[in-house]
Amino acid sequence: MGCGKTTWSKKLAAHLGYEFIDLDHVLQDKVGMTIAEYFAQHGEDAFRKLESSILKETNYPENVVVSTGGGLPCFFDNLQWMNANGKTLYIKLSPKALAERLENAKTERPVLRGKKGDELVAFITEKLAEREGFYLQASHSISGIDLSVEKLEQALV
């Protein structure tokens, strides 16, 4: 959350002349509600199962850049499936850098409501501790500092 997955995926797709798919949007279109609403009504387990099925059942064009939610690689065999079916990229940033971005973000994220400063950094640090073992299994990794489309493209070679 906050590393720029969607922003950089869109930019990379445009740069390469590829299509862009945001799996969060695919999911929201399918269920007719926001992810936060689905989470609240059905719980995390149902959400993660739906998210996994959408990942695996979506028909992808040959040349596509896909953006996923930050939790998707951490459940079931999703990351292994993505690695087997394409290239995956972990955009790595420190908890402090992520917190700064998220505090200044225009989009409000329900999971972060009311968290600022040290509390936000602590929350992000905890989430990264849970998830980074999965993220590091991505086929490619890059620092999110001073990122450019050219650096992204090079990282995926």
Image (spheres, rainbow, N blue to C red):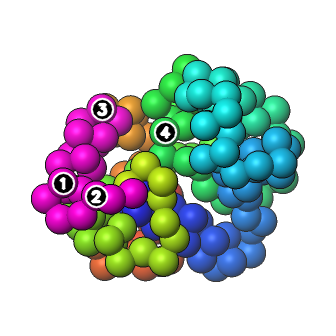
Mark 4 element type: loop
| Location of residue 86 in the rendering, given as x and y in whole percent from the top left corner | 63, 43
Q: Which of 114 and 156 is in front in this view?
A: 114
When the figure is inspected, residue 109 is found, relative to residue 39, above or below; the finding is below
Mark 4–mark 1 distance (CA, rounded to whole Å)? 20 Å
When the figure is inspected, residue 30 is found, relative to residue 54, above or below; the finding is below
Q: Residue 71 carries which label?
A: 4
Q: Which mark is residue 130?
A: 3
Q: Is residue 136 left or right of residue 65?
A: left
Mark 2 or 4 closer to N-term? Answer: 4
| Number of marks in the rendered image | 4
Residue sitting at x 35%, y 36%: 131
- Residue placed under numbered mark 1 in the picture: 119
For the record, the magenta segment spans 113-131
Q: Residue 115 carries which label?
A: 2
Q: Residues within 10 Å of mark 2 (few under 14, many from 20)?
A: some
Q: Is residue 106 left or right of residue 21?
A: left
Q: Can residue 143 be seen in this view?
A: no
| Location of residue 80 in the rendering, given as x and y in whole percent from the top left corner | 54, 27
Mark 1 or 3 closer to N-term? Answer: 1
Q: Which mark is residue 47?
A: none
